[in-house]
Structure formats: C-alpha cells, structure tokens
Image (tube, grey):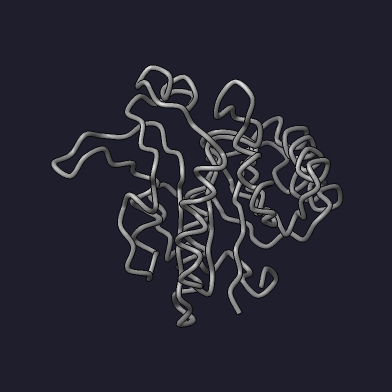
Amino acid sequence: MSSAYFVTGTGTGVGKTLVTAGLLAAARQRGMSTAGLKPVAAGCELTDEGLRNEDALALQAQTTLPISYEQINPVALEPAIAPHIAAAEAGRRLSADRLAGVCRGVMMQRPDLTLIEGAGGWRVPLNDRETIAELAKIMQLPVILVVGLDLGCINSALLTAEAIQRDGLVLAGWVANQAVPTMDRYQENLDTLQRWVPCPMIGSVPYQPGIEAEQVVEHLRLDALL
C-alpha cells in the first residue's frame, strides 16, 4: 500500500530536507520504493545540466523510482529568496494546480512512500492568491511538521499546527530538529511541544553538524507514521 505526505516546517532552515531525506532513507532500508519531491526550490546553482538545488538533490539521492531531476524539482529558481518573488523576476508564474499535476504524475508509479517537501513554512506565497499550502490542500495530503528547536519554537509550532488543521488537513506527525548547538531549557521546550502539538512526535533529531540522511534514520519512528 502506497503512502504520501506533505512535509512542512515552522520556517526556513528548520531541517525539512534533513528530516524528509531521513524518512526516505528509513523506507529504503526496509526495501520500500520511494519518491522525494521538492516542487519549488529557490536558491539553485547553474550547472552543465541546468539549475540544481541542494535540497532537491538530497531527496533525489533517497529516491528509488527512476525519475528525472525535473520531475523531482519542476520549478528551480536561482536566487535564494521568496519563491513568488524569484518566479516573478524570472518571468514565471507559479500555480498550485500545475505543481500538483507534476506530483500526481510521479505518484502514478505508486511508490511505497512519497514525500513532497514544501518551501519555507506553511504560508509561503506561490503567487498573488495562493500559498504553498494550496498544493497540500489540492492533493489532500496528510502533513508532517518539522519543528526547529530554538527560541520561539513553541509559538511557531502551535500556530503552524493550527493553520494546517484549519485548512482541513490531517496533521500526521511532527519531528523535533535541534536547529542550534545549544538551547536553554531544551528538554522543557520539547516536553511542552509534546503536550501541545496535536499529533504524535515521530522523531527527535539532535544537533550534529554535517549529519547525513542515513544518520537521521535512528532518530525517526517510521512505524509511527506508517
């Protein structure tokens, strides 16, 4: 049976890609087929093969389906700025419907686990009317929330969880990612989040510079998700 989830975060740089790649790696280790998608990526480098994004490449490395980079990351934008601004500067218009179409095309191959990673946080604009949340809403995907453990994370996590549920989507699980080397009252903040975030915690990733997806696996509970 195939499963698909949308992965969002409490903001930019909270560890969405690390957690997404880790979950895909965990599935791969179990012999499951996987697809990791990053429909919109801002902050791409120009290569001989075209624009490439570090996060999308990390997901491609954990994808077992024989799909192209362009299917994983159909919208690659060079400047590392808000996607709707980068798209406007490039003369492109982002559309949640079109992004959903690309994602559905990949999902027609029925991988055991598909993870679609958003851009930034839940309310990052795609255009003048839509945010990235519209993609998850159109596809009616359950959502995994990545919380970057840092000062202010409780408020950000609860507001994001509330927005996801108000949009009518299921909050399937959340992952704590220690975003900074040290945090005052780390355990107390984690305990508070476990009490208040209205879904199971499916992982707690410690701070470790240069940590790879395979190393994240031991800190995630794939069973709790599936």
Please state if 224 lies on the left or on the right of 50 as rendered: right
Q: Quadrant of residue 90?
A: top left
Q: In the image as oriented, which residue stretches furthest toward the left? A: 48
Q: Residue at x 51, y 67 (%)?
A: 217
Q: Residue at x 68, y 62 (%)?
A: 202
- Tell which of 53 and 208 is nearer to you: 53
Pinpoint residue 192: horizontal percent, then vertical percent.
Answer: 82, 46
Pinpoint residue 162: horizontal percent, then vertical percent.
Answer: 82, 40
Pinpoint residue 7: horizontal percent, then vertical percent.
Answer: 59, 50
Q: Residue at x 64, y 24 (%)?
A: 129
Figure quadrant of the N terminus: bottom right
- Tell which of 184 and 45 is nearer to you: 45
Work out whether 109 lies above or below 84. below
- Tell which of 123 and 97 is nearer to you: 97
- Tell which of 153 and 71 is nearer to you: 71
Pinpoint residue 32: horizontal percent, then vertical percent.
Answer: 48, 78
Work out whether 205 lies above or below 120. below
Please state if 86 lies on the left or on the right of 175 as rendered: left
